[in-house]
Image: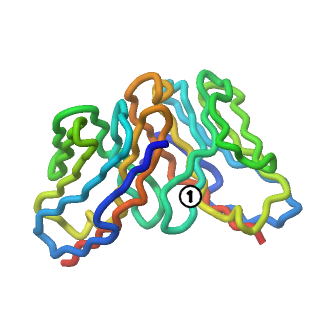
């Protein structure tokens, strides 16, 4: 069974800081999904990647298949980035990480 | 605005009630998912439908009964629920089943369910 871990669990940053959230998994996967969940509950898909790097606005996601590791970076963080960030590993089944709770202070 | 619509947004029911949660998408997606999410925990997969057929049932108690009447609709019928079933119930869809191809899932805003 795939185990998915995220670090840190909680993160508080000042507006403008560069943020990195890490995700690691234990068995091979076909793709990794980064999701954002705001306090209201709705989940937004940020990236789905199986290799390399993807960028959208201030968000960058990378994955290293050999090391079974992915990172989500947020440049020039803003209070509206405050949310829970979840990585989900897609392989034989879907396994969600525990989430990283990010608070960006003005 | 989400492309996956869930109704109702909130539901309060007693343990003897029967109610249904509804999920609708018009993106032509052929895989649809139900998740349960407790506070401060990640979503847990409950059911997956692929081409209107139940593909995955993650050992969910029979008091939860899914139904996929057509490719755009997914229901979750609830009966004799327990207080511990109070949670956020999320629906998602993807073009095809994720184990077949790398299709991102699109999530609804969820139904917040409280069992009295």
Q: Chain of mark 1?
A: B
Q: What residue sits right under mark 1 in the picture?
A: B37
Query: In this view of the protein, which residue sits in the foreground, B92 or A64?
Result: A64
Question: Could you say where residue B71 lies in the image, as x and y percent from the top left?
Answer: 61, 25
* Left or right of A17 in this view: B99: right
> Which residue shows up at 50% across the image and 63% down it?
B41
Eyeballing the image, is B77 above or below B87?
A: above
Eyeballing the image, is B116 above or below B54?
A: below
Q: Write down the quadrant of residue B48 in the picture.
A: top right
Q: Quadrant of the C terminus of chain A?
A: bottom left
> Which residue shows up at 78% across the image and 72% down it?
B116
> Which residue shows up at 20% across the image and 39% down it?
A64
Q: Write down the quadrant of residue A51 in the picture.
A: top left
* Left or right of A80 in this view: B85: right
* Left or right of B101 in this view: B47: right
Query: In this view of the protein, which residue sits in the foreground, A58 or B4?
Result: A58
For numbered disc 1, what is the local secondary structure? strand
Question: Could you say where residue A4 lies in the image, as x and y percent from the top left?
Answer: 39, 51
């Amino acid at each position: 069974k795939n185990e998915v871990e995220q670090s840190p669990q909680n993160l508080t940053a000042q507006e403008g800081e560069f943020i990195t959230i890490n995700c690691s998994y234990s068995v091979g996967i076909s793709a990794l999904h980064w999701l954002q969940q705001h306090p209201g509950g709705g989940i937004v898909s940020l990236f789905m990647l199986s290799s390399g790097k993807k960028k959208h606005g201030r968000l960058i996601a990378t994955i290293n298949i050999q090391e079974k590791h992915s990172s989500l970076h947020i440049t020039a963080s803003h209070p509206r980035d405050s949310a829970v960030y979840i990585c989900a590993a897609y392989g034989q089944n879907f396994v969600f990480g525990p989430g990283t709770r990010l608070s960006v202070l003005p | 605005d989400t492309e996956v619509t869930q109704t109702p947004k909130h539901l309060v029911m007693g343990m003897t009630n029967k109610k249904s949660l509804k999920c609708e998408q018009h993106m032509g997606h052929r895989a649809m998912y139900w998740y349960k999410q407790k506070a401060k925990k990640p979503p847990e997969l409950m059911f997956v439908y692929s081409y209107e057929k139940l593909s995955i049932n993650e050992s969910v108690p029979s008091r939860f009964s899914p139904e996929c009447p057509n490719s755009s609709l997914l229901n979750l019928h609830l009966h004799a629920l327990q207080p511990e079933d109070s949670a956020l119930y999320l629906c998602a869809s993807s073009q095809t089943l994720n184990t077949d191809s790398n299709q991102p899932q699109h999530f609804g805003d969820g139904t917040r369910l409280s069992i009295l």
